[in-house]
Amino acid sequence: VSVATEDIPVRMPSYECQRITALKHHNHRFTTALELLEEHAGYQGGGQRADSRARGFRRASCTLKSLSHPLTSIEQAGKLPNIGPHSLAVIKDILEDGYSQEVQDICDGDFYNTMQLFTGIFGIGCSTARKWYEKGFRTLDDIRNDSTITLRKDQKIGLELYQDLNTPVTLAEANIIQELVKAEVQRLQPGATVVLTGGFRRGKTEGHDVDLLISHPTEGKETGLLSAVLARLRRKNLLAYESTTANTYDPSTVTKKEYTLDHFERCFSIFKFDKSWISSKPTSQSPPGVVKPGTSNPDLPHQGDRVSLGTAGGSDGESTAEKAWVGRRVDLIIAPASQYAYALVGWTGSKYFNRSARLYAEREMNMKLTSHVLYDPVKNQYLSASSEEDVFRHLQLPYREPTERNC
Ligand code: CTP
Ligand code: MN
Ligand code: MN
Ligand code: MN
């Protein structure tokens, strides 16, 4: 007996963390539109309300990502969890017309495109971007040439390296940076670990940055490591920008709301990624700990193509066109051994997976999940975990591989 896929009853749990969400799925034509609406809603002012509108689109998108077949009827969409009326209307338009006029209008509009341009500047958030948009600014040169604008150090470098930082980081580049940092870290503290987290750990082959989680199996041996590593990188002239934040973790404040952000010692940085480190042959891996900046590795062909600055960007290439390196955003996070499993879950993401897991922990388990620990306020107990599996087990969730956490 054959049953049309749309007639199979879909039983989908409503928390994203209870489901499998892979990078590849069957409903990209809907999710692309919904996530554009999410992005657009996030650009709007209005704080909490704008945020919750944005999240509504994202939750609908996540539901369709978890669906095991292409959505073919609006009736079925109506039975799925977390799809609100606005998202449903957009899905209906796409089912009926093949596209959504609302999405098309946003894409064609000045607001969306300008906000995308300005929020692409490292250090610029939605509110500054919106302020500039409202003042009538539309291009990067409008910002560069306006004498009334004072930029912070990070924003200045964001403008300078705009082209670099808006060229996706490849997995090959991320692996090279991970190896480079690992070599430095282990020279300082043998046995220390450096793991590539973020989108790359979830199986993405491109990202906006490189997220490296640094730890040591012996609690305490991670202390002082970040500043020492940064000193070495600085001496080798590998850093274009760095901003370090000290550890502010205080377990006694774990129940406070602010814990959506974590409190690890960290550095938001921009690496000078030497173009000679990468070749067109994906198999040839340079030992980056050995390659000195400014000198070329004789084993590698000189190949700038893979990381070219992209001349298509028009007026933005002037000063950056000749430099031998490409700016790459790197986040370095230090986690003590006892918090490592939670830090790994937190920094692997996705952001929406974490959001959902924290909501689930709070509402369904009466517990507080952070990137540091899981806390049970009823038993006044901090639940220790030595692996990601432990974290899922404590939450009574089926284990999900990082590649299944792409909500
Ligand atoms: N994260 C976090 N606290 C921050 C910043 C990020 O816990 N202050 C988490 C995010 O929730 C995410 C992971 O760290 O799960 C990586 O963040 P980010 O680099 O922003 O996102 P990616 O998923 O790696 O996406 P991309 O590929 O664009 O870098
Ligand atoms: Mn609406
Ligand atoms: Mn990332
Ligand atoms: Mn990051």
Image: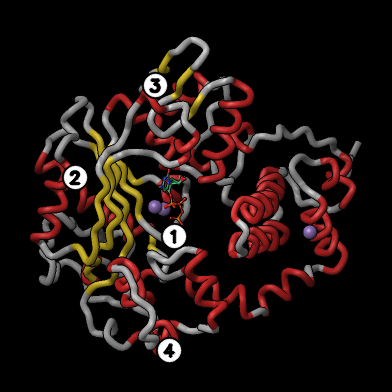
Front of the two marks 2 and 3: 2
Front of the two marks 1 and 3: 3
Task: Give the SS element for disc 4.
Answer: helix
Q: Position of residue 286 (x, y in %)?
A: 20, 59
Q: Is residue 216 left or right of residue 405?
A: left
Label 4 or label 1, whichever comes before in sequence order:
1
Which amino acid type is shown beneath numbered disc 4? Gly
Which amino acid type is shown beneath numbered disc 2? Leu
Q: In this rendering, is residue 118 above or below 69?
A: below
Front of the two marks 4 and 2: 2
Neighbor class of circle 3 (other Cα within 10 Å; few <14, some 14-19, many 20+) is many
- Give the numbered dot on residue 206: 1
* CA separation in Å, label 4 and label 2: 38 Å
Observer able to see residue 363:
yes
- Give the numbered dot on residue 314: 4
Label 4 or label 3, whichever comes before in sequence order:
4
Which amino acid type is shown beneath numbered disc 1? Glu
Q: Is residue 102 left or right of residue 147?
A: right
* CA separation in Å, label 1 and label 3: 30 Å
Q: Position of residue 330 (x, y in %)?
A: 31, 56
Q: In this rendering, is residue 384 above or below 333?
A: above
